[in-house]
């Protein structure tokens, strides 16, 4: 991947459509991201600013982001200084990975104040900084940089904004053929080794050029990527390829695309990546490309961080139950040998005349097993023959009675494990909006302690969860519960008696409801694919999915959340296609 200066240059041209737009809403869904709702001439849009150290980015987005109940301090500051403000300009700073948003807003006295939002997209040093544009003073940053971290530049309220240090590279849009040759030769002379690659010289000499773009230019030039034997002929070819790429970007003839290489790695650029072998996905604009590349990865990463403690707790609980089941199975095996104690008790009773007090053993004829005609029965010397017989009968009764209790404990442990594995599977494809519902469910079930900040009073009545609604190719709504709270709502409150319910057979998965009494075979197959995809079998082929009417689905008394039993089902076998499911129209209601 390469979110370089070329991509940001193309994006800045695309975002000029937001100039003169008004900022309606601002919220901060997590520690790194800001979402701004803008009203522009073309309509309402959402602009994502992300200082995520792993996935820094900035683009327009259609993705749904959760608005936290309590806004962070930086978000509150942005709302104070930017909401209802008008964007005067959006532009890239040079060819660096820095974007500057200039805006104006009227303060409480009606005076116009000019502000600037600086978005620095520089890996783990990424930041979003709000400035007073008149005095160039920092009002605040989403990430603070103290003097202890950096002596060159401080990002703290009240500090003067200092741009990241200049790297001394040439502007690729300003170089001439002569300066291009001189710059490449100069960097070649300063190279520490003769084995330096040509594409590395490009990266070192020219601002905004990533290794990926540099490799593409070298490939288009048709020269070897070794700088050792660089002559005038090779420089001429490199200049021709380089100037052609820069003219293409300067004129706005961009080609946003993602290449899924044969090695499994994906790369994106605003120019065609002809040096990579793999399948190419083309996009209408830069924002769509960045959304496709980063959106799901960033969300999955955020979800993993947010549910790490839950996943660990679930794994520990499952492991404890597995160990408990092993021990219970051993105890059950011993208890199932209870008949041996009854036989010994009866043989002692039948041979009382041959036993004397103080005997430690009885050799008796075994009337019950032909294979063992004589059996040796241990005796307690301090007990009478009658008391020895009673001792074996008591052991028999105790062992016999314990079988039912052991089986009950095994059933409880197995049921709990099924529930825990279902929740663990739900965490694998949970969206950020679903995580809190799963956490609340586990809190109510006693697996997670309720945090102090969560012990606030809630509104009376049951809260309605947000449900994902897909639309089939026949225009029929299909509701999918992605956790047990949503499953309970979809199955027992939202669906009607004669509507169709689906669930992956015998494995943890989502409850799926076709919200119509009349639909075609295509809708049924698509609903089954959704049930298979949002289940433990999402990576499998020919996943069995049961379908029945809601009136045949019921929840046993005292059952765990999301657990149901059903009958009158028919089973379909489907293979979920991730790309097809992602392409299905859907929204959250």
Image (cartoon, rainbow, N blue to C red):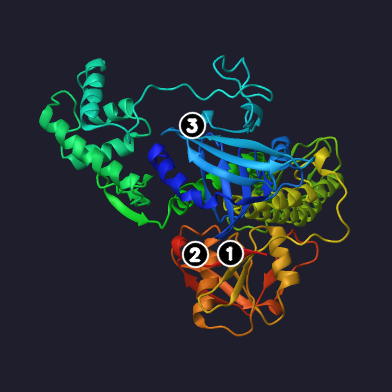
Label 3, label 2: how far apart the Cα atoms are: 34 Å
Q: Element at badge 3? A: loop
432 left or right, relative to 202: right
Q: Residue farthest to the front?
A: 111
Q: Which residue is mark 2?
A: 581
Residue 117, image x and y in percent?
Answer: 59, 37
Can I make out residue 240 in this image? yes
**Residue at 77 percent of width and 40 percent of height:** 379
Tag 3 residue: 122
Q: Quadrant of the N terminus?
A: top left
2 or 1: mark nearer the eye:
2
Which quarter of the rendering shows the C terminus? Answer: bottom right
Report helix, strand or loop for mark 1. loop
Q: CA distance from mark 2 to mark 1?
A: 22 Å
- Asked whether residue 337 is in view, the answer is no
Position of 73 compared to 274: left or right? right
Which one is closest to the eye, mark 3 or mark 2?
Answer: 3
Task: State which tag comes first along the sequence, 1 or 3.
Answer: 3
Q: Residues within 10 Å of mark 3 (few under 14, many from 20)?
A: many
Q: Residues within 10 Å of mark 1 (few under 14, many from 20)?
A: few
Q: Position of residue 580 (x, y in %)?
A: 45, 65
In the depicted view, which residue is nearer to us: 232 or 313? 232
Residue placed most toward the observer, 569 or 530:
530
How crowded pointer 2 is (Cα within 10 Å; few <14, some 14-19, many 20+) is rated as: some
Question: Residue tagged by mark 1?
Answer: 506
**Who's the residue at 57% across and 14% down the image?**
151
Quarter assignment of residue 506 = bottom right
- The answer to whether the residues at label 2 and label 1 have Cβ atoms under 8 Å apart is no
């Amino acid at each position: 991947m390469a979110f370089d200066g070329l991509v940001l240059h193309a994006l800045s041209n695309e975002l000029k459509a937001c100039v003169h737009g008004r900022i309606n809403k601002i919220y901060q869904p997590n520690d790194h991201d800001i979402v701004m709702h803008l009203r522009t001439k073309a309509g309402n849009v959402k602009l994502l600013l992300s200082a995520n150290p792993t996935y820094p980015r900035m683009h327009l987005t259609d993705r749904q982001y959760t608005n936290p109940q309590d806004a962070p301090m930086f978000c509150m500051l942005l709302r104070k200084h930017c909401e209802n403000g008008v964007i005067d300009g959006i532009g890239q700073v040079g060819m660096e990975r820095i974007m500057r948003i200039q805006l104006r807003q009227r303060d409480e006295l009606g005076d116009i104040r000019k502000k600037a939002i600086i978005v620095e997209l520089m890996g783990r040093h990424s930041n979003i900084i709000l400035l007073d544009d008149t005095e160039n003073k920092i009002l605040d940053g989403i990430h603070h940089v103290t003097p202890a971290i950096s002596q060159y530049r401080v990002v703290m309220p009240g500090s003067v904004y200092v741009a990241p240090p200049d790297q001394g590279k040439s502007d690729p849009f300003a170089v001439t053929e002569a300066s291009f040759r001189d710059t490449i030769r100069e960097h070649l002379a300063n190279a520490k080794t003769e084995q330096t690659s040509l594409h590395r010289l490009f990266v070192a000499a020219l601002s905004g050029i990533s290794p990926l773009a540099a490799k593409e230019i070298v490939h288009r030039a048709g020269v070897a990527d070794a700088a050792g034997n660089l002559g005038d002929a090779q420089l001429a070819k490199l200049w021709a390829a380089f100037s052609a790429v820069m003219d293409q970007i300067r004129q706005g003839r961009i080609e946003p695309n993602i290449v899924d290489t044969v090695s499994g790695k994906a790369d994106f650029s605003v120019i065609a990546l002809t040096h990579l072998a793999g399948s190419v996905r083309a996009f209408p604009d830069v924002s769509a490309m960045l959304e496709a590349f980063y959106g799901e990865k960033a969300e999955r990463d955020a979800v993993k961080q947010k549910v790490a403690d839950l996943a660990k707790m679930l794994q520990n609980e499952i492991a404890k139950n597995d160990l408990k089941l092993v021990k219970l199975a051993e105890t059950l095996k011993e208890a199932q040998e209870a008949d041996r104690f009854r036989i010994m008790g009866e043989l002692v009773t039948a041979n009382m005349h041959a036993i004397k007090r103080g005997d430690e053993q009885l050799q008796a004829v075994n009337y019950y097993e032909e294979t063992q005609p004589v059996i040796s029965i241990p005796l307690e010397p301090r007990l009478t023959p009658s008391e020895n017989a009673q001792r074996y009968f008591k052991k028999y009764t105790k062992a016999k009675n314990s079988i039912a209790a052991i089986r009950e404990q095994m059933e409880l442990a197995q049921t709990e494990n099924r529930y825990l594995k279902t929740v663990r599977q739900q965490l694998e494809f949970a969206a950020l909006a679903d995580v809190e519902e799963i956490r609340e469910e586990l809190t109510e079930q006693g697996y997670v302690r309720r945090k102090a900040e969560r012990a606030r009073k809630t509104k009376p009545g049951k809260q309605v969860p947000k449900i994902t609604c897909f639309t089939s190719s026949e225009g029929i709504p299909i509701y999918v519960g992605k956790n047990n709270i949503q499953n309970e709502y979809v199955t027992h409150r939202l669906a009607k008696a004669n509507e169709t319910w689906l669930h992956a057979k015998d494995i943890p998965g989502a409850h799926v409801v076709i919200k119509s009494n009349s639909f075609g075979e295509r809708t049924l197959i698509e609903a089954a694919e959704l049930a298979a995809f949002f289940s433990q079998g999402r990576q499998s082929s020919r996943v069995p999915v049961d379908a029945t009417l809601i009136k045949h689905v019921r929840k046993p008394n005292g059952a765990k959340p999301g657990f149901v039993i059903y009958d009158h089902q028919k089973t379909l076998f489907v293979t979920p296609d991730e790309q097809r499911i992602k392409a299905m129209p859907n929204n959250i209601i």
